[in-house]
Structures are given as structure tokens and as C-alpha cells.
Amino acid sequence: AQKITQTQPGMFVQEKEAVTLDCTYDTSDPSYGLFWYKQPSSGEMIFLIYQGSYDQQNATEGRYSLNFQKARKSANLVISASQLGDSAMYFCAMREGVDTGNQFYFGTGTSLTVIP
Amino acid sequence: EPEVTQTPSHQVTQMGQEVILRCVPISNHLYFYWYRQILGQKVEFLVSFYNNEISEKSEIFDDQFSVERPDGSNFTLKIRSTKLEDSAMYFCASRYNRAWPGGAFFGQGTRLTVV
């Protein structure tokens, strides 16, 4: 089974609108972290936000928030007030365990295009 | 702000040649990773490294690959005999800590082209 599933290969959003990028995950480890990365056309991977499995509240970082629904195993990224610079690939990732060198599992990504 | 740096940004090599991709992780980080991304495809895990040894490796990371942390600051990925299918963007990443947040910070990548 896929550890991380992103079902939206491409999304469009009007500038200044909010957009939700979907992510579901699969793990039996009670300790895990969920992450979102942004990859602009230049290629680098930019860490945006994380959510720990024991966190009670949804994570927020500026215009980014993570809608964490543990029972549904979903960790959707919400970008509020979209800007043209938000156009990029977005990857959801998960790491199991805490104090380990465990790998990050990545989804296949969602390409977001912000329309002026 | 500290960052992970990778050199070179782009490397072209002939099939069968050895390449070494270099990374300088963030200085107080403990865990190090190599990932690769074939153009337009998903990010694939290669190897993780902690306490001077490999923690975990994927099926991709066969005998042609090796990693080293030769001097306490650099973290290198060596591909002994490159194949055409090794052409990809290679990302180094590092992570500090024993507790969350546990996000890894990625370098800007080395684009490897095997001809």
C-alpha cells in the first residue's frame, strides 16, 4: 500500500482565493510526522509545515495550515490568499517514528497553478 | 538562515564513469539523507545516515552507490559506474533532532545527466 497518496495531479486557483491540497497517509506506527514541501520550477524542495501525530491542534505557518484528521488519515494543506508565487509542485510526506533515521515517504505531488 | 548546500548544481558525465555528489548539511544536524527525483516524477528515497553509518537504504541504493561523511561537515554520494537511468535530480537533506518538528531541510539539488 502507498504510504502517501495525493490524488490531485493538478490544481488551479484564482489569486487571493484559498485552496486545499489533499493528502492521505497509511501507517500503523502511532508516532509519525506529516510534512508538506513546495517545489518551484527552480527545483529546490522547500519545507513548509509539519504535523506530529500527537499534536492536538492543526499546524499553521503563515498562510499555510494543515487540516489534520487523524481518524481519516488525512493531512490536507490549505493555502489561504493564494499568490502567483505559490505556483509550484507540492509534496506531502510522512516519517514514521521519532528518534530514528527513518526515511521520509513522499507522495506523487500536486501541481498548483495560481491564476491572476 | 542555515541551509544545506550541494555542489555541483549540474553535472554531466559519461555512462560508466564515477561521480561524487557533495553536500554540506546544516552544522548541528544529526541525520542525513539522499533522495533523487527523475524529471517530473516522485521523490525517491535512497539512503539515510546517522552516527557515521547507514540507517536505512532503499532498493535503488545498490552496490553502485555509497555514502560517506569524510570530515564531519561534508556528506557525499558516490555512484561508481553511472547508467543512463541514473540521470535525475539528487537531493541531500539533513535533520537535527530527537523530537518534532522533524522536518528535513533539503539542499537545492544536483542535476545529474548521464550521456
Image (tube, coloured by chain):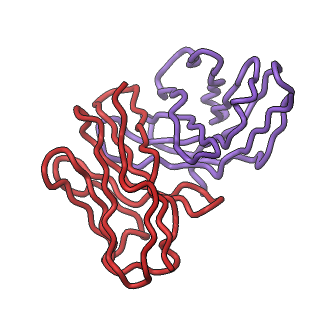
**Residue B88 location in percent, x, y?**
52, 64
**Residue B22 location in percent, x, y?**
31, 55
Of residue A71 and residue A77, the one placed in the foreground of this image is A77
Residue located farthest toward the left when viewing the structure as drawn = B71
**Residue A103 location in percent, x, y?**
41, 49
Image: A48 above or below A2: above
Q: Residue at x 47, y 65 (%)?
A: B112
Image: B61 above or below A116: below
The quarter of the picture where residue B78 lies is bottom left
**Residue B13 location in percent, x, y?**
42, 75
Color of chain A here? Answer: purple
Image: A56 above or below A98: above
| Chain letter, red in picture | B
Of residue B101 and residue A115, the one placed in the foreground of this image is A115
User: For the image shown, how many numbered marks are present on the structure?
Assistant: 0
Q: Residue at x 13, y 50 (%)?
A: B71
Of residue A56 and residue B25, the one placed in the foreground of this image is B25
From the viewer's perspective, tell me whether residue A100 is left or right of residue A30: left
From the viewer's perspective, tell me whether residue B57 is left or right of residue B110: left
The quarter of the picture where residue A90 lies is top right
* Quarter occupied by the N terminus of chain B: top left
Residue located farthest toward the bottom when viewing the structure as drawn = B16
Q: Residue at x 31, y 47 (%)?
A: B32
Q: Residue at x 51, y 80 (%)?
A: B115
From the viewer's perspective, tell me whether residue A9 is left or right of residue B83: right
